[in-house]
Image (cartoon, grey):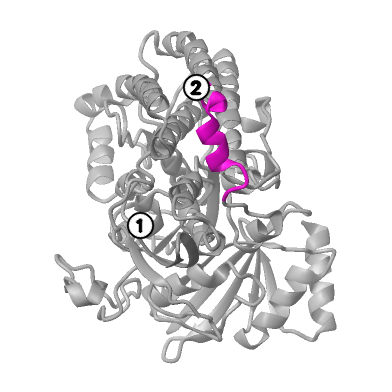
Amino acid sequence: MEELIELNIGPQHPATHGVMRLKIYLDGERVKKAETIIGFLHRGSEKIMENLPYQKAMVWTDRMDYTAPILQNWAYVLAVEKLLKIEVPERAEYIRVILGELQRIAAHLIWLGTHLLDLGLMTVFMYAFELREKILDFFEEISGQRMNPSFFRIGGVAADTPHGWLKKVKDFLPEVLNKIIEMDEIIQKSLIFERRTKGIGVIPPEMALEYNVTGPVLRGSGIKYDVRKNFPYSVYPKIDFGIPVFYDGDVYSRYRVRIEEMKWSIKIIEQAIEMIPEGDVLINDYKVVPPPKTKIYNSIEEMIHHFLLVTEGFPVPEGEVYASVESAKGEFGVYIVSDGSNKPYRVHIRSPSFANLQILEKILPGHLISDLVAIIGSLDPVFGEVDR
Amino acid sequence: MKSLINLIEHKLNKEKIQFSLEIKDILTLKINKENLLKVFKILRYSEELLFDYLIDITACDYKEKNIFEVIYHLLSFIRNERIRIKVELEREKPEIESVCSIYPGANWFEREVYDLFGIKFLNHPNLKRILLWESFPGYPLRKDYKLEEEGPIPTLEDIY
């Protein structure tokens, strides 16, 4: 029996957004056994959210998957709205869809860039980040923030779109599509990329089910499941779009799924911009949503509403709820138990990265150490979300 | 939903298992902890139900009632339906059977619940803390663990 070499990789390493320690046992260059050690970024988000009023707890959802904050906002807001039984104005729903899909593209671009940088394709990294910066400009314009917009509100979105914003987004879309196609062409031509991804890190569909992965990882293994289609929320039923599925289950299929998903996202945004109606973006219930500033300054009643909302928040009816959205990584679910007070009694986040990362120990053995970076990158874990 | 309720009632009555069904935001099934594995096997393997996908495991601390509740969310691709399963545990001796033998992916979820609530999962293949270090005092998500200004700081031995 040969002796295995124990090797520590991490906590800091290039293949992840965040910190993870990987303990691997090597026989020559082959991985025999792997152990993931997480928790370096654990901040106790759930506990902190349980000690904050509902609307203030929302900003914590931004800081979980910090590459796709808007989508996390969405899941949380959906859960609270389900408890309050609020109907959101239609214009707000469309703005949510547009922002959500823009965010999905941005999140996939950051994945694409860093993943390919790990594999040695520098050009695409530059392209992807340039494009992502341009998308973040739209977020800055609408919310004033690039990274953690916290733009959604319980009952709508924080503000209407600035003048000309929708047209600008629409004009920008062909550029995104062309750039994605161009990047895809460059990558497909690369022999290195092909050799390093095809047949690497294979997840058979049965294993994907057993280890409850979601998102592009699941769809790369040939199972067609997308929360947007299977359990539709918001105005997705009105929009026509498809779900890309690839059947090999290797790093390459997961790459293809994400590329195709970005193309579909562009189509969704196009349709949403065409269909968006005029109207309010927030509900008129001043018990939940702060009144507009002009009213606050001119009427004592609205002033009191505003004051109470800021200091105490609002009570939420008793009950429990699970709401989920399709985040860039998979099914992002929020489970809330309310005891009727202004703070959630229990918040639990079902984060896709946490579930997806679990499979790593299973698929690593048998691969070369140089494949490790490709496999970790293809799962796209973000550690703010894994550790919470 | 109606057919699902009938089906579950039929299956569980046949096995003489006590339960209560409620429709909240999704169908909620409350069972005793002794029947956990039996119920999970029925839900997972019977061909009409086929809840083959475990979404999530979490827990909630009801301190006034002196119980913990373990909450499972399951999903069936074929039926395209979700179900929630709740199990009550006594607060003094929180122990429950692990479902890793049925859903191997439950491994990390159960470790997380063990880590943050101190609920023991019997027959779990590798039950140790996952997010916090081994010598961390207390269980942070229990209601009697107060949110403090500064928590304990791990030493190097705790981490490595």
Three-letter code, disc 1: Arg
A197 horizontally vs A131: left or right: right
Residue at 70%, 79% in the rendered image = B19
Mark 2 residue element? helix
A231 vs A32, nearest the viewer: A32
A356 vs A195, nearest the viewer: A195
Mark 1 residue element? loop
Residue on which disc 2 sits: A183
Q: Where is residue B147? Give x, y as percent.
A: 23, 68
Q: Was residue B16 drawn as part of the magenta stretch in this picture? A: no
**Mark 2 and mark 1 residues within 8 Å of each other at the beta carbon:** no
The residue positioned farthest toward the bottom in the image shown: B93
- Say if A387 sits above or below A1 in the image: above
Find the magenta span and give its range: A186-200
Sort mark 1 into few (<14), some (14-19) or many (20+) by Cα contacts within 10 Å.
many
Question: What separation in Å lies between label 2 and label 1 (alpha carbons)?
Answer: 33 Å
Query: In the rendered structure, the residue with mark 2 lies on which chain?
Result: A
B34 horizontally vs A318: left or right: right
Residue on which disc 1 sits: A388
Task: Please tell me how many numbered marks the rendered image carries.
Answer: 2
Sort mark 2 into few (<14), some (14-19) or many (20+) by Cα contacts within 10 Å.
some
A361 horizontally vs B86: left or right: left
